[in-house]
Amino acid sequence: MKSMNHFADSVWSRFFDFVFPYERDLTRKQIEAELMQSGVDMRPSLAKLGRVLNQAHRSHEARKSLESARKKRSSLLAKLIGIQAPSGSVIRETLKGMITERLAGSQQAVYARKLESAASDDDLRSLLEDISRLEAFSEDSEDGES
């Protein structure tokens, strides 16, 4: 036979129905018994199918989780963009209060001079971080001495 396409699909269906038994009428146990008689062990194939299905399920769950995280990320970014940092004058007043209340002596003079020379908001934020770190360091050293 040169080509299997020589006959229509319906002819091939009737041929295979004639040659092979009709499995739709068999129960699951009958099919398993026939496979066992033929020496076909389906356990490894079924185990592999189970692993593939579990992996597909995990992949689907991971995609759902990633999509959820992306949605949350965009809403969080929108919230963060909506939050505005305090203006330079507010930071400047806060720093002035911190310097006069919490620092003394030469430290107070040094930080007051830095406050006067601070030109940008970034300078003010940096000064605020410096004072906060100095206080944290002072508290840690006092705790260590006790």
Image: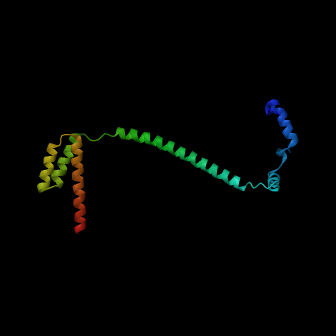
Judged left or right of residue 124, residue 58 is right
For image coordinates 84% across by 40% down, the residue present is: 16
Residue 101 coordinates in the image, percent (x, y): 17, 53
Residue 116 coordinates in the image, percent (x, y): 14, 44
For image coordinates 81% across by 51% down, the residue present is: 31
- Furthest-right residue in this view: 18
Nearer the observer, 67 or 82: 67
Q: Hey, which quadrant is residue 38 in on the image? A: bottom right
Q: Considering only vertical position in the picture, is 82 above or below 136?
A: above
Q: Colour scheme in the image?
A: rainbow
- Furthest-bottom residue in this view: 146
Nearer the observer, 77 or 54: 54
In what quadrant of the picture does the C terminus appear? bottom left
Q: Hey, which quadrant is residue 79 in on the image? A: top left
Q: Considering only vertical position in the picture, is 16 above or below 129?
A: above
Tally the marks: 0
In what quadrant of the picture does the N terminus appear? top right
For image coordinates 22% across by 56% down, the residue present is: 135
Judged left or right of residue 23, residue 81 is left
For image coordinates 87% across by 42% down, the residue present is: 19
